[in-house]
């Protein structure tokens, strides 16, 4: 995978972890917030970010217990990009990344499907 794409993926995952950390920290400190986050995550995410979440994006919040933990395996943002990209394709991916919203960062680790599709069609 091209080094610039790896860097974008890393930065995007860091942004996701930062958002998740803030929500988790607040949920630990505020029981009312935690209950709202569990029961209506879309409303909480929209309110806390000031952004509307696309209707096509499903958000599920689950709480671990003392006896059960979860490992979230994110979607591979670029499963078909295995070779070096042409400069045109790389610019397409980079252009798509600069316009990412918070929710595309969360959902597709900032390389939106359109950017990946555009890059693949150019190679």
Image (cartoon, rainbow, N blue to C red):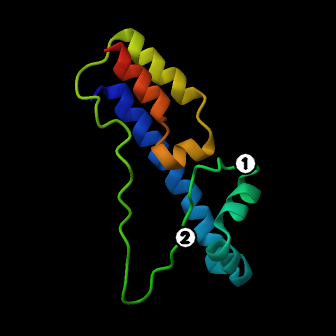
Task: Tell me how far mark 1 sits from mark 2, CA to CA.
Answer: 18 Å
Picture quadrant where residue 93 is located: top left
- What residue is shown at x 51% (from left), y 75% (from top)? 62
Left or right placement of residue 38 versus residue 64 in this view: right
Q: Which residue is mark 2?
A: 61
- What residue is shown at x 39% (from left), y 34% (from top)? 7
Q: Position of residue 30 (x, y in %)?
A: 70, 80
Q: Which residue is mark 1?
A: 52
- Marking on residue 120: none
- What residue is shown at x 71% (from left), y 52% (from top)? 49
Q: Position of residue 15 (x, y in %)?
A: 53, 47
Q: Is residue 72 above or below residue 113?
A: below
Q: Is residue 108 above or below residue 26?
A: above
The C terminus: image quadrant: top left
Residue extending farthest left: 83
Sequence-first disc among 1 and 2: 1
Q: Residues within 10 Å of mark 1 (few under 14, many from 20)?
A: some
- What residue is shown at x 31% (from left), y 17% (from top)? 85
Q: Residues within 10 Å of mark 2 (few under 14, many from 20)?
A: few
Q: Position of residue 22 (x, y in %)?
A: 61, 63
Q: Nearer the viewer, residue 68 or 59?
A: 59
Q: Position of residue 75 (x, y in %)?
A: 38, 49
């Amino acid at each position: 995978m091209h080094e610039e794409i790896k860097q974008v993926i890393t930065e995007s995952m860091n942004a996701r972890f930062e958002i998740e950390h803030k929500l988790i920290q607040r949920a630990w400190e505020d029981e009312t917030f935690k209950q709202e986050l569990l029961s209506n995550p879309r409303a909480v995410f929209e309110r806390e970010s000031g952004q509307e979440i696309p209707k096509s994006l499903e958000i599920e919040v689950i709480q671990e217990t003392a006896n059960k933990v979860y490992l979230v395996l994110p979607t591979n943002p670029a499963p078909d990009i295995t070779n070096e990209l042409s400069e045109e394709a790389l610019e397409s991916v980079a252009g798509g990344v600069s316009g990412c919203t918070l929710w595309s960062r969360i959902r597709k680790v900032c390389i939106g499907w359109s950017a990946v599709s555009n890059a693949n069609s150019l190679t």
